[in-house]
Image (tube, rainbow, N blue to C red):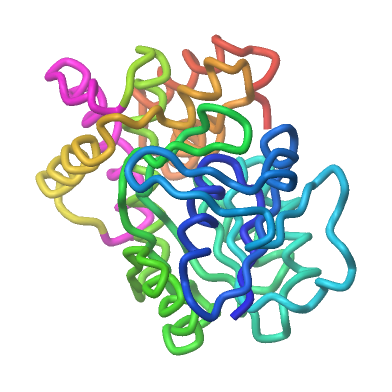
Amino acid sequence: MRIAVLGAGSLGSLLGGLISRATGVELMIHGKGEHGAMMVANGLEVKGLEPFKLPANQALFTLEEVGVPSTLDGTMDAVFLTGKAKSTEQLASLALRLLSPAGVVVSLSNGLGHAETCAAILGPHRVVAGTTTYASWRPNPGVVHYAGAGTVVLGHLQGGPTKGQVEPLLNALVRAGVQAEWTDNGPAAVWMKVLLNIAINPIAALAGVENGALLAPSLFSSALETMLEGASIARAERVPLPDDLELEHHLQRVLESTAENQCSMLQDVRAGRITEVAYLNQAVVERGERIGVRAPMNHMLSAMIEALTPDLNQR
């Protein structure tokens, strides 16, 4: 099976590294910038929870600045999009080139709207919902720190591939030691990840702390309030979610399992990069406005994150 990981930052690099351990998989990892260049030259080093190295000759590393050879067009059975939210359209267009006729694409980017973007470019029959709670961050170019094990959830979207069509990909993930699951309700899976992101990312970024610090009562109450605002909007859109108590327990479990992780928004703020708040908290606010449900905590957090980098956080 041929699998491509596009937009390989911290999460994509970790996922690619994990997938490389599966038998019967030919792997392509597509990055950019100094991190991507270091992987092309030296391969990938994974530190943290399960340290290992992926030599440059044991996967096909490609670089955005150089481009992808046309010989790879139409060869991939599955493509993961793992780049920043703003890169979804660009990466989906590359996936359109790479996918075989029966291939599927999975977007693991944070936020709302990515499945719709992929469906518009690739057709809904190729798009699988995807989320993950694996945690990682990049200490140096060419290196990723494996901060927390999690789950990769793949799910059905209206008009999209069935579980049977996705079974080879699920099996490949399992062979790689990745905890992978299928759900028949892809939108609910996406919303569950969004609820975690809106609760954790902006507060951790503003406080400048790792995820585990949000278990402190004052920060946890703010994170939970933010999460439940989003849940009320999802339920108004008729997305089936667990009750509020189970959501609270879920948030606590994720914070515990990723306690040492520096969330992506914290990394972006520290590096002066664009954040994904427009696709997370602000997107939740906009969804709420369309149906008449307010989300004041999400609005406040979005405004505060945007104030940190006013010239960057624009869609």
Is the magenta region chiefly helix, strand or loop? helix
Q: Quadrant of the N terminus?
A: bottom right
The image quarter containing residue 75 is bottom right
Q: Residue at x 63, y 73 (%)?
A: 26
State the residue in front, 95 or 15.
15
Residue 291, percent across and down?
A: 43, 44
Magenta residues span 211-240
For the image shown, how many numbered marks are present on the structure?
0
Q: Residue at x 87, y 47 (%)?
A: 66
The image quarter containing residue 306 is top right
Q: Residue at x 48, y 83 (%)?
A: 168
Residue 312, percent across and down?
A: 68, 20
The question of residue 218 being in magenta is answered with yes
Residue 249, percent across and down?
A: 12, 43
Residue 275, percent across and down?
A: 57, 27
User: Is residue 21 toward the left or the right of residue 273 in the image?
Assistant: left
Q: Residue at x 59, y 41 (%)?
A: 9
Farthest-out residue, bottom: 164
User: Is residue 231 toward the left or the right of residue 64 in the image?
Assistant: left
User: Is residue 264 toward the left or the right of residue 271 in the image?
Assistant: left
The question of residue 269 being in magenta is answered with no
State the residue in front, 164 or 223.
164
Location of residue 270 with respect to 214 vertically, above or below: above
State the residue in front, 18 or 262.
18
State the residue in front, 106 or 61.
61
Location of residue 244 with respect to 300 vertically, above or below: below
